[in-house]
Image: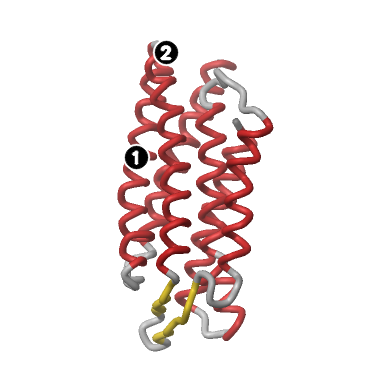
Amino acid sequence: MNLYFTLLTFFNFLWASSLLVGRMTTLGMFWYYAGVLLAYPVALGIAISLYYFCISFPTQIRRLSNLNHFLIVLPAVIMSIVVYIKGWFVLSYDKDIIHTEYTLYVNKLSYFIYSLYFIVLVILALKELYEKIKISESIFKYKVIILFVAILIGLIFGTYFDLFLCYFANYHYVWFGPLFTFFMNLTVFYFIYSSRDKIHG
């Protein structure tokens, strides 16, 4: 559980950093590859680490087979490669240096597949938590419910600002996404360490 939380925090930080680089720098290819494009593979890392975290929080009730791991990770690897192939994901872009904004024009099919994979993975994470809500008791049920709500809020608003609007080439509000993932991270951090204090207290 701690490992997946660490990965979730790392990918959230990297995602926010890539968006910041994309909006604030004008360093040519560094801006494009380390800022704009990096955000997409990193976002998949957030979804995967979140899914594995939800499987293990607060306790793991089932184990995934090697085939399950393969089917979860392989699409992310393929899509992370596709993002960097010219014309397969991003067709072209505009950068407004004065207003530190950019607009990407994407391959609609590739973007739809990417978005669908991301949303399905987060929904599966929510499904794991929902199953644990039904079997958890007392304080653990309360924590799982709060975490479920935090992730659901992040999914709804993050999907709207960082997937749906971007599909229509509207990148004005992409900075909202990291705010919701930061809120989600704080919720997870609190529950992990409050549980640890109760165990050792």
- Report the colour scheme: secondary structure
Q: Position of residue 190 (x, y in %)?
A: 46, 33
- Name which residue type carries label 1: Leu
Describe the element under mark 1 as helix, strand or loop.
helix
Decide which of 151, 86 is in the foreground and name it. Answer: 86
Q: Position of residue 122 (x, y in %)?
A: 44, 41
Residue sticking out furthest to the right? 66
Decide which of 164, 26 is in the foreground and name it. Answer: 164
Q: Position of residue 151 (x, y in %)?
A: 39, 39
Identify which residue is drawn at 54% across, 34% down: 53
Image quadrant of residue 166? Answer: bottom left
Q: Position of residue 108 (x, y in %)?
A: 40, 67
Q: Which quadrant of the figure contains the C terminus?
A: top right
Up-down relation of residue 1 to residue 72 (above or below): above
The residue that label 2 is drawn on is 135
Image quadrant of residue 65? Answer: top right
Relative to 78, 108 lies left or right: left
Describe the element under mark 2 as helix, strand or loop.
helix
Task: Tell me if mark 1 has few (under 14), some (14-19) or many (20+) residues whose alpha carbon lies within 10 angstroms of its own.
Answer: some
- Name which residue type carries label 2: Ile
Relative to 111, 56 lies left or right: right
Q: Give the CA separation, mark 1 to mark 2.
A: 20 Å
Q: Which mark is residue 152?
A: 1
Identify which residue is drawn at 42% across, 87% down: 97
Q: Which quadrant of the figure contains the N terminus?
A: top right
Identify which residue is drawn at 34% across, 73% down: 169
